[in-house]
Image: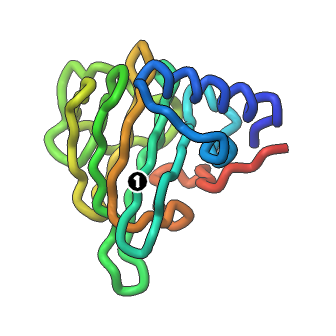
Amino acid sequence: MISKKEFSEAKEKTLEFFAKAGIAITDEEHDRIEVADFGLSDLKNTGLQILTYVNTDRVCAKELVLTPYQTCPEHRHPSLDGREGKEETFRCRYGSVYLYVEGTPTSGRGVEPPDGTYTVFHEIVLAPGQQYTLSPNTLHWFKAGEKGAVISEFSTSSHDESDIFTDERINRIPEVE
């Protein structure tokens, strides 16, 4: 759970990152920025700021903001109601993002995960203009580099409340006191 003050500060920091990435948003979009601490009350290390532009039965488009060294914890997007899980493409717009997926673990990784449960360590580093597409149901986590990161996500329909996290302490739906 995060405090109202932490929530407000995170939203303002998100606006700063959008400006660095040259991303303009409307006042209405500002009001929809989500601040997720994943129920760990450690937003600085484990968290994600999200602006969802569109999420229909077929497509989803979001901006994801990570402050310096902030991590989105390991998870996957399972099949739902007989439909294949979410396929998503991450495109780095600002900073750098270290994406970890299933596969041969990378030695000498660029970053390490925060406290928690992490099991996949095949590293893909994205700089501005680079992108990577994840197949449905792929276990993954990602962390910003020293400048933080802005990532555009393009995907099939998103059902964040159904994501399956490796760390059982995670609560995907944010709670603000």
Task: Name the residue rendered at 36%, 75% in the picture.
Answer: 79
Residue most toward the left? Answer: 104
Q: Is residue 67 above or below residue 157?
A: above
Task: Name the residue rendered at 54%, 38% in the picture.
Answer: 25
SS at mark 1? strand
Task: Name the residue rendered at 44%, 48% in the picture.
Answer: 62
Residue most toward the bottom? Answer: 82
Q: Is residue 2 above or below residue 52?
A: above
The answer to whether 29 appears left or right of 167 in the picture is right
Instruction: Report x, y in % for residue 166.
Output: 45, 52
Question: How many numbered tags mark residues here?
Answer: 1
The answer to whether 129 appears left or right of 153 in the picture is left
Callout 1: few (<14), some (14-19), or many (20+) C-alpha neighbours within 10 Å? many
Q: Nearer the viewer, residue 136 or 102?
A: 136
Residue most toward the top? Answer: 146
Instruction: Report x, y in % for residue 43.
Output: 63, 31
Instruction: Report x, y in % for residue 132.
Output: 21, 43
Instruction: Report x, y in % for residue 67.
Output: 52, 24
Can residue 168 be seen?
yes
Can residue 37 be seen?
no
Residue located beneath label 1 in the image: 61
Q: Nearer the viewer, residue 26 or 56?
A: 26
Amino acid type assigned to the residue bearing label 1 in the image: Ala
* Placement of the N terminus among the 4 image quadrants: top right
* Placement of the C terminus among the 4 image quadrants: top right
Q: Is residue 98 above or below residue 138?
A: above
Residue most toward the right? Answer: 177
Residue 145, quarter of picture? top left
